[in-house]
Image: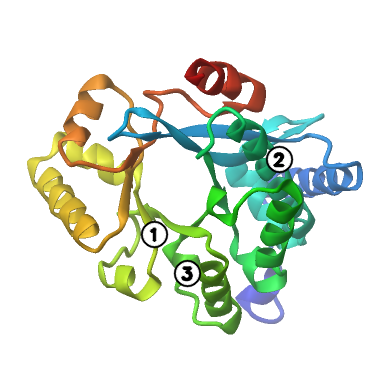
Amino acid sequence: MAKQHGRNCCYIFQEEEYQNFLRIREITNELHSAVNHDFRGFSIFFQPIMDIRQDKLTGAEVLIRFASKKFGQISPAEFIPLLETSGLIIPTGRWFIREAITACRKIRMQIPDFRVNINVSQVQITKSDVITDLISETNTSGLPLTAIAIELTESILLEKNEKAQNFLKELKQAGMQLALDDFGTGYSNFHYLSELHPDIVKIDRGFTSKAITDKKEYYLLNQFSNMIHNLGLKLCIEGIETEDELQKMKLLKPDYCQGFYWGRSCPYDEFRKHFVDVDR
């Protein structure tokens, strides 16, 4: 830290910084231990994705969770960056893909067209052959590659490096769908849609909440929805929480919706109970 401020100086850590340093070190150690012990403490949760036009469950976004013996349930916003900086995201990502695809295969016995959305990190793209991992696991499970959609943010997709470009090319060649996640945040630009060629565009909750309460934002989202469909793409609106919000968003004619209105993300058994078994 002192080097960042120049030579011949010192830096005095505050107690809060030191405690944060200790927490990061201990969580990283627990992540290492979990990976070395068959991913003990990791689990996958499912957030339902609804086909609004047919009013039925069409898939789920699969999310990774981690519980520590010492710290309990740790936020993904805290442990995922530690997985990435430590390189543990590579083996953990392979485990996550395997678990998600296995669950998808089981659910497809009752819902034949069920699809799982899997988030992939920049580290996985640049430091591993994640496409091969995806293809290998789907082949082993007997699932078609169309049963998988890969969710990526613009910041990852717009990386001007060979690995990222090859990833996009191989993803399309394999036949997996690409979902552009969190659109409407950061530096979202309509031009990216023609450059990245996503199959699905997901509207971030922040954009959705503004459109619900602001007429101008609602008008923009309506125009955007029309443009997406004119381009032959699918639209997913995230963050639906109430019946009123659902009815207002339905007027925009999205293809898919997600949100707490249908339920929070939950473990596999709970997801099956509330969303899969009732669809038979």
| Snapshot colouring | rainbow
Nearer the observer, 18 or 280: 280
Q: Amino acid at mark 1?
A: Asp
Callout 2: few (<14), some (14-19), or many (20+) C-alpha neighbours within 10 Å?
Answer: some
Query: Where does residue 75 sit, x and y in percent of width and height?
Result: 61, 38
Residue 199 badge: 1
Examine the rendering and report whether any part of residue 13 can be seen: no
> Would residue 86 be found to the left or right of residue 143 on screen?
right
Q: What residue is rendered at 20% in x and 34% in y?
A: 250
Residue 102 badge: 2
Of badges 3 and 2, the one in the foreground is: 2
Marks 1/2: CA–CA distance:
24 Å
Residue 157 badge: 3
Callout 3: SS: helix
Callout 1: SS: loop
Callout 3: few (<14), some (14-19), or many (20+) C-alpha neighbours within 10 Å?
Answer: some
Tally of marks: 3
Q: Are marks 3 and 2 in contact (CB under 8 Å)?
A: no
Query: Where does residue 196 sit, x and y in percent of width and height?
Result: 39, 71
Callout 1: few (<14), some (14-19), or many (20+) C-alpha neighbours within 10 Å?
Answer: many
Q: What residue is rendered at 31% in x and 43% in y?
A: 206
Marks 3/2: CA–CA distance:
27 Å
User: Of marks 1 and 2, which one's residue comes earlier in the chain?
Assistant: 2
Q: Amino acid at mark 2?
A: Thr
Q: What residue is rendered at 65% in x and 73% in y?
A: 126
Q: Amino acid at mark 3?
A: Leu
> Would residue 49 be found to the left or right of residue 70 on screen?
left
Callout 2: SS: helix
